[in-house]
Image: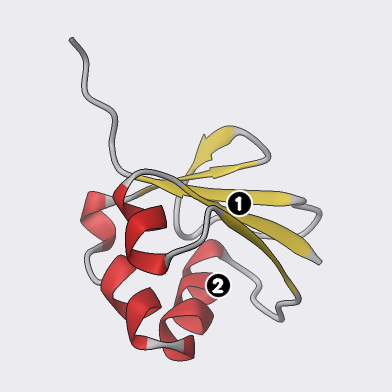
Amino acid sequence: MIDVMYFAWVRERIGLPRERLETMAATVGELVDELRAREPRYEAAFADLASLRVALDQELSSFDAPLAGVREVAFFPPMTGG
């Protein structure tokens, strides 16, 4: 099981702040593909990966990163300074 967290507009499009999933995905990208296939709201949230960032166990990562041993995946838009 893996905890998947959604922030900002990703959470708004999906309608959930977090969920616990069983996945066969080996990488973040494969997890995104599984999520996209679930429902249109997930497809909308993950339509443009260039506008998303991902963190694995609270460390910034990439979409080709392996999920082995990961407990938490978080998706969020890029942060802007100010």
Looking at the image, residue 16 lies above or below residue 82: below
SS class of the residue under badge 2?
Answer: helix
Q: Is residue 69 left or right of residue 28?
A: right
Q: Is residue 29 left or right of residue 44?
A: right
* Mark 1 neighbour density, 10 Å: few (under 14) some (14–19) many (20 or more): many
Along the viewing direction, whichever of 66 and 5 lies nearer the viewer: 5
Residue 59: x and y, percent?
Answer: 58, 33
> Residue tagged by mark 1?
73
Looking at the image, residue 4 lies above or below residue 23: above
Amino acid at the residue labelled 1: Val
Q: Quick one: quadrant of the N terminus? A: bottom right
* Of callouts 1 and 2, the N-terminal one: 2
Outermost residue on the top side: it is 82
Say which residue appears at 49% left-offset and 78% top-offset.
Answer: 35
Residue 3: x and y, percent?
Answer: 70, 56
Say which residue appears at 61% left-offset and 51% top-offset.
Answer: 73
Say which residue appears at 52% left-offset and 75% top-offset.
Answer: 30
Real-space Cα separation, disc 1 to disc 2, in angstroms: 10 Å
SS class of the residue under badge 1?
Answer: strand
Along the viewing direction, whichever of 15 and 40 lies nearer the viewer: 15
Amino acid at the residue labelled 2: Leu
Determine whether label 1 and label 2 are within 8 Å by CB. Answer: yes
Label drawn at residue 31: 2
Residue 67: x and y, percent?
Answer: 68, 60
* Mark 2 neighbour density, 10 Å: few (under 14) some (14–19) many (20 or more): some
Q: Is residue 22 left or right of residue 7?
A: right
Looking at the image, residue 8 lies above or below residue 45: above
